[in-house]
Image (tube, rainbow, N blue to C red):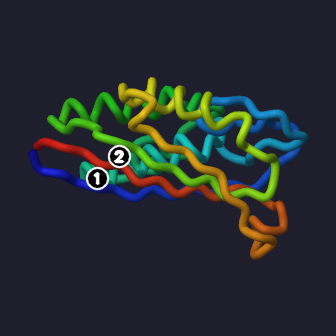
Amino acid sequence: MRQRFGIGYDSHRFAEGRPLILGGVTIEHPRGLAGHSDADAVAHAVIDALLGAAAMGDIGHLFPDTDDKWEDADSIKLLQEVRRRVTAASYTIVNVDVTVVTEEPKLAPYIQAMRENVARAVALPVGAVSIKAKTNEGLGAVGKGEGVQVFAVASLGGA
């Protein structure tokens, strides 16, 4: 089996009047993330990691923010669609590793539910999905509490 790897990245600023959704989990916080869809930066980074590993473009190509069809879209459903496309191209998703960088809120109470949601969306056992939370130690815009950055790596087998 041939192995392929992809890297995904996403970032969003915090915004008033929106829920904070990461990994399909609504997180208790006074601000959500600005974005055309639900702004789930975890799902978006995983989408780009999977698409990158399969050499199938990126999230903006498949789900452009210029298309009203994707406004307020559930990003976990977008991730499920990407899984469908990747597996239809004869790839097997092997694992996903995610790092969320934010000063606030503390994500530890939500990590397991996020792992379960992402695992379900990409049809993997929870043990094949890692999600970690880090701070930026006060450095840069994320360190000043202005938003969230997410990095993801996905591995595929086959094709």
**Callout 2: helix, strand or loop?**
helix
Q: What is the x, y in percent for residue 54? A: 25, 49
Count of numbered circles in the view: 2
Mark 2 neighbour class, 10 Å CA radius: few under 14, some 14 to 19, many 20 or more: many
- Quadrant showing the N terminus: top left
In x, y percent, where is residue 138?
Answer: 81, 71
Instruction: Identify the disc placed on residue 18.
Output: none
- Horizontal arrangement in the rendering, residue 109 relative to residue 73 (left or right): right
Do the residues bearing badges 1 and 2 touch, measured as CB atoms within 8 Å? yes
Q: Type of residue at label 2?
A: Leu
Identify the residue shown where x is 45% and y is 24%: 120
Q: Is residue 14 above or below residue 81?
A: below
- Where residue 51 appears, as percent x and y from the top left, is 34, 48
Q: Is residue 117 above or below residue 9?
A: above
Seen at 36% across and 29% down, the residue is 124
Above/below status of 82 relative to 96: above
In the image: residue 11, left or right of residue 83: right
Instruction: Give percent across and percent down for residue 53.
Output: 28, 52
Which quadrant would residue 147 be assigned to in this image? bottom right
Reading the image, the residue beneath label 2 is: 50
Which residue of the protein is positioned furthest toward the bottom in this rendering? 139
Taking the spot 78% from the left edge, 68% from the top edge, the residue there is 143
| Residue picked out by circle 1 | 53
Q: Amino acid at mark 1?
A: Ala
Residue 4 sits in which quadrant? bottom left
Distance from Cα at disc 1 to Cα at disc 2: 5 Å
Horizontal side of residue 121 vs 71, given as left or right:
left
Q: Residue at x 46, y 45 (%)?
A: 46
Give residue 103's quadrant in the image.
bottom right
SS under mark 1: helix
Quick one: 67 or 38, which is closer to the camera?
Answer: 38
